[in-house]
Image: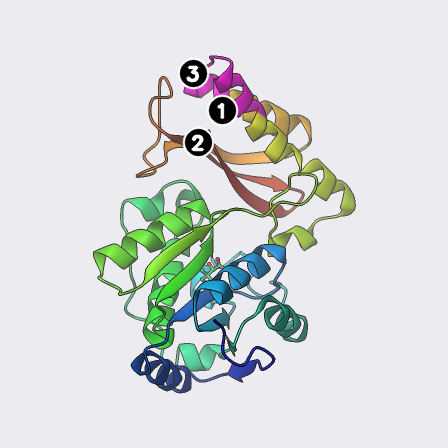
Amino acid sequence: MRENPEKLKIIRKPVSLQKFSKKILSSGKSIGLVPTMGALHRGHASLIEMSAKNNDITIVSIFVNPTQFGANEDFAKYPRRLRADLKLCREAGATIVFAPQPKDMYPLPLSTFVHNPKLETLYCGAYRPIHFAGVLSVVAKLFNIALPTKAYFGEKDFQQLHLIRRMAVDLNFPVNVVGAKTIREKSGLAMSSRNEYMSAEERAAASSIYVGMCEAKRLLRRGETSVVKLKEAVRGIVEWAGGKIQYVEIVNKGDLTPMTGKISKKAVILLACFFGKTRLIDHLEL
Ligand code: PAF
């Protein structure tokens, strides 16, 4: 379905992309958008491939968004390597890379934000107070700039995906938000641009996150339905491997409300933890 399979075009200015997208849409073609912060890996490639298969045009945005990082977070050290990213985009089937400068995305400091007051303070939001307002606001801008028919996000950022889906519904964005399965390394560690911050030992130890979540799933299958016990099983394994848990929660898959007592509906484990100085998040459906 993709146009110009061998050509990858880079667009830097929001107005130029908006003009391009309007033209594409008016000719009856579909646009898939894959929003990213770069440092692309196989997880991103799977999103781009999915978009290229299902849309005429695939736009990959590469923008390390300053408004979603707290003052003491890793904005400055977040990996930036456009050349390698372009190669991955080309190979995965993208048509356009949108790589704006911060001054193009934010000619004025942002004063209008998208909030979800309840959900943005839970789980990751409890430890990263401005994070989700920054994410939702930049994704809203990207939707308005790229005018996608479909937008693709990894399920790895489970809370983020839920918030973006909800924003699209609440604010009537004419876009179909598609979530894609988490891609894992052989060890079970979820692929993330932040994995490269870790030493080889930390990276090996971090596979305990997946092991811990799988153990909770195994216990549930064998009849253990206590939320506390299942959370303890995850915590025990991650901490044994040297991880520092920030939170482990078991939540309703549908609305992300925390579960207490016994597992009742479709449940998902959400967690954040540190291996060394690297903060990792993951999830597993139970
Ligand atoms: O998941 C990410 O990489 C970012 O949060 C996103 C969605 C591209 C917004 O900056």
When the figure is inspected, residue 27 is found, relative to residue 179, above or below; the finding is below
Look at the numbered disc 1 and give the secondary structure of its residue: helix
Look at the image and give the residue range highlighted in magenta: 215-230
Left or right of residue 286: residue 166:
left
* Residue ID for mark 2: 249
What's under tag 3, amino acid-wise? Thr
- In the displayed structure, 275 sits above or below 114; it is above
Q: Looking at the picture, how far across and down is residue 272, in whole percent?
A: 52, 40
Residue 129's disc number: none
Residue drawn at x 57%, y 45% as measured from the top left: 280
Could you tell which of marks 1 and 2 lies nearer the N-terminus? 1
Q: Is residue 115 visible?
A: no
Q: Position of residue 102 (x, y in %)?
A: 47, 77
Which mark is first along the chain, 3 or 1?
3
Residue displayed at 47% across by 71% down? 1
Return the residue found at the far right: 200
Res. 251 visible in picture? yes
The Cα atoms of the two marked residues, 3 and 2, are separated by 14 Å
Q: Position of residue 217 (x, y in %)?
A: 52, 24
**Disc ID at residue 231:** 1
Nearer the camera: disc 3 or disc 2:
3
